[in-house]
Each structure stands twice: as C-alpha cells, then as structure tokens.
Amino acid sequence: MNLVDIINKDNLPKHLAIIMDGNGRWAKQKGLIRALGHENGTKSVRTVVETSAKLGIENLTLYAFSTENWNRPKLEVELLMNLLINSLRNELKTLQDNNIRLNSIGNIDLLPKSAQKKLQEVIEQTKGNSRMVLTLALSYGSREELINVVKNISNKVKNNIISIDSIDESIINQHLYTQDLPEVDLLIRTSGEHRISNFLLWQIAYAELYFTDVLWPDFKEDDLYEAIISYQKRERRFGKTSEQIK
C-alpha cells in the first residue's frame, strides 16, 4: 500500500506551514556551492505545493525568507532574490494549472523593487484561484509582526477606534499578517533542527510540530505523507482531557 492511501482525507490540516531548512547543508554534503542547494530546494517547493493541492490541503505557508536572512552574505541574498523572481515567473503556470492562489506575508517593502513587482503580478494573476492558498513568508519575522500588532492596536486605542477592554484574541488576529488565514494545524521543519526560528509564533499556539532529518532539497511526496500520517495519529485536545473530546 502506498503512503498516500493511508491518509484520511477527512482529517487533513486546514493550514500546513513548513520551515524549509537544509539547502546549504545539502549542497555542502555534495561538495557543491550553496547556490545549487537553493536551486534544488525550489524543486521540493514545486513538489510540496502540487502534492498539498492534490491532497486537498486548503492553506500552505512556506517560510521562504526571514528577517534574519538579510544578515547573510550580500551575494547569497542577491542570489535568493533572483531565485525568487525566477521561481515566480516559472511557477505561474503551476499555480494556474492547480488552481492555487498566491499570497505573501512579511515586510515586503524590504524586497528589491523587481521582486516586489513580480510578486504582486503573480498574486494579481492568481487571485481568482480557489483550490488552495499558497502563502510565501518573505522578509518575515514573527516578533516584528507582533510588534506591529501592538503598535497598530495601541494607535487605535489612542484614537478611540477601539477600547482597551475590547482587545482579545480576535482583535489580535485581525491585525496579524495572517488575518485571512486559519491558525496553523501542522508545522513541519526539515533538516533535523528543532527550532521555530521566529516563524508564526502566535499562529502555531496549538499546532502539531513535526521535525524530520531530511534536508529540504530531498523532501519529496512520501516525506510529506509521513508528516501528515504522524499528524493524524495524534490526539488534539486544545487543553481539554481525552474524555472531553471523545
């Protein structure tokens, strides 16, 4: 029996998020330059996006470039930005063929103008698609996001738009980059690291975490299936007892 046949299609994560880690180490292990690791990582992106859509996952969020990644060597940052532009150009057909809508979160204004332009073009061209929402976290950092939430809500309180007493989880959710997305159900991180790395800290409060030693360029369909099967074996209690949720 194939792994995909084991998956319960009625119990899929509504929102799957992935920290795509290990491109550099993959290249180093093979005696290649880091650039080739990133290029091969884009193949796994296409595989995971297409597989997720076919399974019926409604929301997929990929940690593509963090706020901390700006601190990498200038040449590598430039390469990653060029890779982003080329990927957006090359993968538009994949998004259209699979009825996938592109979305982005993060401090997009920090991206090069050419990357911003291509990103907005693809978002606009896919806005009518409805099978799955693919969100790219670009120049994204969760702490920065939460600081912006505090500033925006504080400004609204100051201007009597909302009252302090009305601030609850719903109000905070409305001010996040992910305001139009459900909370994360399953978070996957590749490459053997067991960190969250400033990714969706608020949104993963009750997410199931799945860590794998597989480096991102080697992450294929069966690796995704294994993560989802692991997710489906878990009991999600949300603070309740096992007896309460049965």
Image: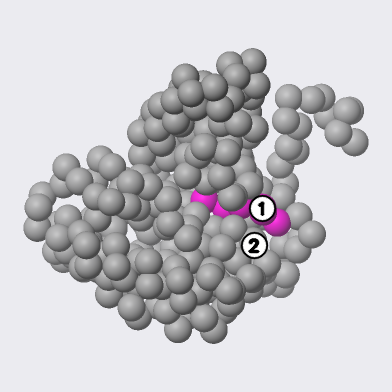
SS at mark 2 in the image: loop
Task: Mark 1: give few (<14), some (14-19) or many (20+) Cα within 10 Å.
Answer: many
- Assess whether residue 243 is covered by the magenta stretch: no
Question: Furthest-top residue in view?
Answer: 165
Residue 101 visible (yes or no): yes
Q: Name the residue under label 1.
A: 13
Q: Is residue 8 left or right of residue 180?
A: right
The residue segment tinted magenta is 12-17
* Residue 192 to residue 6: above or below: above
Of 42 and 1, which appears nearest the observer?
Answer: 42
- Name the amino acid, label 2: Ile
Q: In this view, does 175 lie to the left or right of 182?
A: left
| Image coordinates for residue 142, horizontal then vertical, percent | 41, 36
Q: Name the residue under label 2.
A: 57
* Residue 43 to residue 182: above or below: below
In what quadrant of the picture does the N terminus appear? bottom right
* Residue 169 to residue 126: above or below: above
Image point 57% across, 79% down: which residue? 98
* Residue 90 to residue 166: above or below: below
- Name the amino acid, label 1: Pro
| Image coordinates for residue 15, horizontal then vertical, percent | 61, 52
SS at mark 1 in the image: loop
Of 198 and 31, which appears nearest the observer?
Answer: 198
